[in-house]
C-alpha cells in the first residue's frame, strides 16, 4: 500500500509526459483498490500472483512497446523480458540488470548498502529518465463517491459526529517491530477523549495479530472506542473515512500514506525503519522518531530484550504532537524520543542546545573536562580516589534565544579506574563498558518506560587499548524538585483533613506505581532510598544515581525485596503509618487484598529493614521508619 501511494507522483508525471499514449497499470488487486479511482492510466491489468507464465502470457497479448518497472523484483523484470517488450526501464538491482534495456543505478553508501532516499524521489527518478517533469512531489489519491456513501451507511455515528474524529492505526504489515505498545495507544486515546472530546476509532487490517491489538486497546481504554475490526472497511471505504478525520495517529505503515495523500493531519511513529525512506515533507505531518542506539535496524521483529525504539516514544510526546496539530500550531515536523547528541571532538558528545554555553567555559573535549576545576567540589569521605564530583552553573539560552537562564549541572568523572573495578563492571553489564556509561544506558532504557531521570547534557570516554582510561557524564539538576528524604509534599506536614488525606493517598499510590514501573524494566537499584527518589513541583517522580542500577541475572526477587525494604526503611514513621505502607504495597502489586505470597514478601521486607535498623543502632543512628 505504502509503495503504491508513494509512486503516485511518478505516475502523474508519466501520464502528463505521455499524454497521447495508452497507459496500462499491471498490478495485484490490492494496489488497484487503493489507487482507484485513478486518472493516471487507461486500463488496469490484474497480476496473477506469482504465476510467471500466466503473467508473461497476459503481457504478450497486448504487444506493449515499453515497460516501466517500479517494483524492484527479479520476477517482474523477467516477465517483461519473456513477454518481449522492446523497452524495459527500471533499477539495476537484485541481479536483474541484464533483463533491462534502460537501467538506473540505486544510490549506495560506502559500505555497499543502499542509501536511504525517499521512495518518492526513487520512483520520480524513473519518470525523470523518461523525460517527464518531476517537480511536483505530493502523493495523490481520489475517493469514489460510492465509498463515501458506504461509509455513511456503515459508520453514521462517525460521519455525523460534531466532535473531532481521530483514527488510530496501531498495526503494521511489516512486522511487530513497528508497533507502538497497545497500552500507550489506549492512554493517548483517553487523553484525546478527555481534552478534545474526540471520537476515537481504531483501524486495523483483517490479520488476527492486528485484530488482537485493536481488542487490547479497547479493553485498556477508559472510554468507548470504535473498533473497526468489528466492522471492516474495504480500501476505498478506508480512504473515505480518513478524508473526514481531524487526525490520524499511525505506526510507520501503509495507512499513514493514505492520510498524507488526502492532506490530513497525521502523527507517524517511527522505530526500526529510517524515516528517510518514506519522507514526503508533508506540512500536516509530525514524525516522532524512536532514535535509540540500535535503531534503525530494519528488522521485522525486535531481537533485543527490550523493544527500545518504540517504547522510547512516550504518550506525552504523542499527545503534545496531537495538541499542535489539532490546534493548528505545528512547531516542529520531527520530534525525537531521545535528544540527539553531537560529537564535537573525539568521543565527546554534547546536547547541541548546550554547545555554545559549553564553548564559553572551554568544555569542548574530554581533556578539558578533566582539567576543569570551576564550581563546587562534591567531596565524599567514601568516594574512591579515581572518582570525582563537581557541581557548576552555566548560562543557557531560552527557547526564544533572547534571554538566558542559569542552570545547575553535575559532573561525574572517572579517571583511570582500577582494572578489577572495570572487570566487575563488565560482568554486571555483561559487556565491555566504561564507568560513565553506567549512567547513560539505564537512563535510555528507563526513558523508554516513561520513568524520569536527570537530563543528560554531555558525556565522553577515552580508552587505552582494552581498558578504560577516563570517562565522564554531565547531567542537569532536576528543576524544582527535591529528594523525598529532604522534603515531602506540604500536605504531609499539616493537620490531617479529608482533603489532605486524599492527597496523601494519591501520592502513595503514585509512588507505588512509579516503583512498580521501574521494576517492570527488570532493573534494580542498590540504594532505592528516599534520598534517591525526587519529587517535583509538577507532581512527577524522578530516579537518580543511575550508576547504582543493574539487571540481576539471578536472585531478581531477592533484589526486589531489598529495593522495597529500602523504600520502607527510609519512609519516616511520623508521616507514614502501617496502613499507609500497606496501601503502598497493594498499589505496587495491583492487588485488592493480600495473598499468602504477599504476606511472605512483606515479612521478608520487614525483616530486612529491621536488620538495617540494627546496623544503624550500633552506630548511634535511628532508622527513619522506626517509631
Image (cartoon, helix red, strand yellow):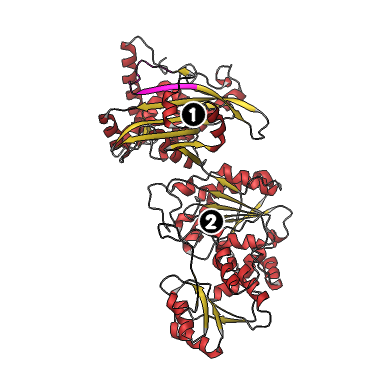
Most foreground residue, 414 or 442: 414
Read off the residue under disc 1: 363
Q: Nearer the viewer, mark 2 or mark 1?
A: 1
* Relative to 505, 441 lies left or right: left
Disc 1 crowd, CA 10 A, few/some/many (<14, 14-19, 20+): many
Q: Residue at x 44, y 40 (%)?
A: 445
Read off the residue under disc 2: 276
Q: CA distance from mark 2 to mark 1?
A: 33 Å
* Relative to 278, 590 lies left or right: left
Rendering coords of residue 514 (x, y %): 48, 34
Q: Magenta region's main secondary structure?
A: loop
Q: Which residues are magenta?
A: 378-391
Q: Quadrant of residue 518?
A: top left
Rendering coords of residue 401 (x, y %): 66, 33
**Quarter of the picture holding the C terminus:** top left
* Relative to 326, 530 lies left or right: left
Q: Can I make out residue 527 in this image? A: no
Q: Quadrant of residue 130?
A: bottom right
Q: In the rendered view, tell whether residue 455 sits above or below residue 190.
A: above
* Relative to 452, 165 lies left or right: right
Disc 2 crowd, CA 10 A, few/some/many (<14, 14-19, 20+): few
Determine if the magenta segment contains residue 256. no
Rendering coords of residue 213 (x, y %): 50, 56
Q: The residue tagged with tag 1: helix, strand or loop? A: loop
Determine if the magenta segment contains residue 383. yes
Most foreground residue, 158 or 267: 267
Amino acid at each position: 500500500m505504502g509503495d503504491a501511494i508513494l509512486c503516485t507522483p511518478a505516475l502523474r508525471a508519466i501520464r502528463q509526459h505521455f499524454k497521447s499514449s495508452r497507459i496500462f497499470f499491471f498490478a495485484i488487486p490490492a494496489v488497484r483498490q487503493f489507487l482507484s479511482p485513478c486518472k493516471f492510466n487507461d486500463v488496469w491489468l490484474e497480476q496473477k500472483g506469482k504465476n510467471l507464465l500466466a503473467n508473461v502470457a497476459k503481457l504478450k497479448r497486448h504487444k506493449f512497446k515499453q515497460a516501466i518497472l517500479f517494483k524492484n523484483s527479479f520476477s517482474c523484470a523477467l516477465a517483461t523480458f519473456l513477454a518481449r517488450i522492446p523497452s524495459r526501464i527500471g533499477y539495476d538491482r537484485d541481479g536483474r540488470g541484464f533483463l533491462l534495456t534502460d537501467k538506473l543505478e540505486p544510490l549506495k553508501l560506502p559500505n555497499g548498502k543502499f542509501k536511504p532516499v525517499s521512495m518518492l524521489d526513487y520512483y520520480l527518478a524513473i519518470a525523470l529518465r523518461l523525460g517527464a517533469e518531476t517537480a511536483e512531489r505530493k502523493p495523490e489519491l481520489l475517493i469514489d463517491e460510492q465509498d463515501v456513501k458506504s461509509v455513511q451507511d456503515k459508520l453514521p455515528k462517525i460521519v455525523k459526529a460534531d466532535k473531532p474524529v481521530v483514527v488510530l492505526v496501531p498495526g503494521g504489515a511489516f512486522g511487530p517491530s513497528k508497533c507502538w505498545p497497545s497500552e500507550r495507544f489506549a492512554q493517548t486515546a483517553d487523553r484525546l477523549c478527555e481534552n478534545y472530546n474526540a471520537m476515537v476509532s481504531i483501524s486495523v487490517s483483517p490479520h488476527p495479530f492486528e485484530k488482537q491489538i485493536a481488542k487490547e486497546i479497547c479493553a485498556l481504554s477508559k472510554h468507548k472506542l470504535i473498533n473497526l475490526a468489528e466492522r471492516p472497511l474495504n480500501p476505498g471505504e478506508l480512504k473515505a473515512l480518513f478524508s473526514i478525520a481531524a487526525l490520524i495517529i499511525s505506526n510507520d505503515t501503509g495507512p499513514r500514506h493514505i492520510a498524507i495523500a488526502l492532506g490530513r493531519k497525521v502523527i507517524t511513529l517511527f522505530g526500526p525503519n529510517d524515516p528517510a525512506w518514506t519522507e514526503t515533507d508533508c506540512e500536516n505531518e509530525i514524525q516522532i522518531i524512536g532514535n535509540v542506539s540500535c535503531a534503525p535496524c530494519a528488522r521485522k521483529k525486535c531481537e533485543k530484550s527490550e523493544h527500545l525504539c518504540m517504547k522510547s516514544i512516550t504518550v506525552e510526546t504523542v499527545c503534545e504532537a496531537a495538541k499542535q496539530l489539532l490546534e493548528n500550531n505545528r512547531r516542529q515536523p520531527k520530534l525525537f524520543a531521545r535528544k540527539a547528541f553531537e560529537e564535537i571532538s573525539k568521543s565527546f558528545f554534547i546536547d547541541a542546545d548546550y554547545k555554545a554555553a559549553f564553548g564559553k567555559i572551554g568544555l569542548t573535549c574530554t581533556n578539558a573536562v578533566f582539567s576543569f576545576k570551576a564550581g563546587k567540589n562534591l567531596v565524599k569521605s567514601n568516594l574512591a580516589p579515581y572518582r570525582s564530583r563537581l557541581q557548576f552553573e552555566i548560562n543557557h539560552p531560552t527557547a526564544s534565544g533572547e534571554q538566558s537562564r542559569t542552570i545547575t549541572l553535575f559532573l561525574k568523572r572517572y579517571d583511570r579506574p582500577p582494572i578489577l573495578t572495570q572487570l566487575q563492571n563488565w560482568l554486571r553489564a555483561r559487556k565491555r563498558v566504561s564507568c560513565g556509561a553506567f549512567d547513560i544506558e539505564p537512563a535510555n532504557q528507563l526513558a523508554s518506560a516513561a520513568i524520569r531521570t536527570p537530563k543528560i547534557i554531555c558525556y565522553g570516554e577515552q580508552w587505552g587499548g582494552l581498558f578504560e582510561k577516563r570517562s565522564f557524564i554531565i547531567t542537569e539538576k532536576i528543576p524544582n524538585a527535591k529528594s523525598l528524604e529532604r522534603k515531602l509534599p506540604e500536605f504531609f506536614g499539616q493537620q490531617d483533613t479529608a482533603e489532605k488525606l486524599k492527597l496523601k493517598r494519591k501520592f502513595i499510590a503514585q509512588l507505588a506505581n512509579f516503583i512498580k514501573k521501574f521494576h517492570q524494566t527488570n532493573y534494580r537499584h542498590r540504594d532505592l532510598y528516599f534520598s534517591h527518589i525526587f519529587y517535583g513541583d509538577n507532581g512527577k517522580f524522578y530516579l537518580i544515581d543511575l550508576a547504582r542500577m543493574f539487571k540481576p541475572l539471578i536472585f531478581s526477587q531477592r533484589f526486589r525485596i531489598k529495593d522495597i525494604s529500602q523504600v520502607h526503611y527510609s519512609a519516616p514513621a511520623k508521616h507514614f503509618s502501617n496502613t499507609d505502607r500497606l496501601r503502598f504495597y497493594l498499589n505496587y502489586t495491583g492487588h485488592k487484598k493480600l495473598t499468602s505470597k504477599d504476606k511472605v514478601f512483606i515479612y521478608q521486607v520487614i525483616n530486612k529493614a529491621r536488620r538495617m535498623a540494627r546496623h544503624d543502632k550500633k552506630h548511634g543512628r535511628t532508622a527513619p521508619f522506626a517509631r
